[in-house]
Amino acid sequence: MGNTRMLFEKAKEMIGELDMTAALRKLAENHKDKIVFSTSFGLEDQVISHLIFSNHIPIKVFTLETGRLFPETYSVWNRTLEIYKEKIEAFFPQMDSVEQLLRDKGPFSFYESIENRKECCGIRKVEPLRRALLGNQVWITGIRKEQSMNRAGMQNLEWDELHQVIKYHPLFDWNAEEVKKYITENNIPYNALHDKGFPSIGCQPCTRAVKQGEDERSGRWWWENNSKQECGLHQSH
């Protein structure tokens, strides 16, 4: 525990006032082959993928293939591979767990209760993430504090106690307009659903467009009516 905490303190001191590209490069240098970026192909993630791929920063990129993604998500995934010619590893849920869930509760059990929804997220996202992070020291994410009340309480560099990794959110202080501007100026491929009122895109049955004035993640698990809607990947501290 002491050594892992020391890694975090060292990383905090190391990136200091560096801009995000320099910070990503420095973290990659100091955590060689033990640094990963998780993408769900949203706007923020596409910005970070662009930074990593176009600058040839040695950070492994992966995605969680839940089996319930939008067709538009697969399209931007494929377009990203075509443009950057870099690998994106896919982590799938354990087949036997999915089969048992569908056998016992059917394909839409997550609408019935928060417990059922968390069970589905646990199988399709949380467990695969655990495997994706295993053996790594740094986890890069596309989190921004503006996205929800829950995320506003985070910091751009954190220690993730559950996964025992350093978490770095390069775009933490960016607003939505800054992200969109960067996407446009750099001609970065993005999910077409963003132009149809979907600021946050997850699994197809659990994501809807948001109304004006709603926070960015209100379209995720909207039926729960809960301001701390998370799937379990990013727990508040």
Image (cartoon, grey):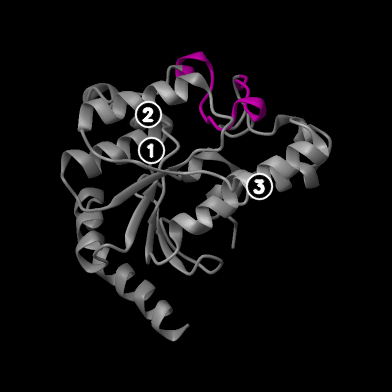
* Residue 104 lies in quadrant: top right
Secondary element at tag 3: helix
* Residue 144 lies in quadrant: top left
Amino acid marked by disc 3: Asp
Q: Which residue is mark 1?
A: 45
Secondary element at tag 2: helix
Q: Nearer the viewer, residue 141 or 148?
A: 141
Q: Which residue is mark 3?
A: 96
Q: Position of residue 18 (x, y in %)?
A: 22, 57
Disc 1 or disc 2, which is closer to the eye? 2
Q: Which residue is mark 2?
A: 77
* Residue 167 lies in quadrant: bottom left
Rendered-image quadrant of the C terminus: bottom right
Label 1 or label 3, whichever comes before in sequence order: 1
Amino acid marked by disc 2: Trp
Secondary element at tag 1: helix
Label 1 or label 2, whichever comes before in sequence order: 1
Q: Which residues are magenta?
A: 193-211
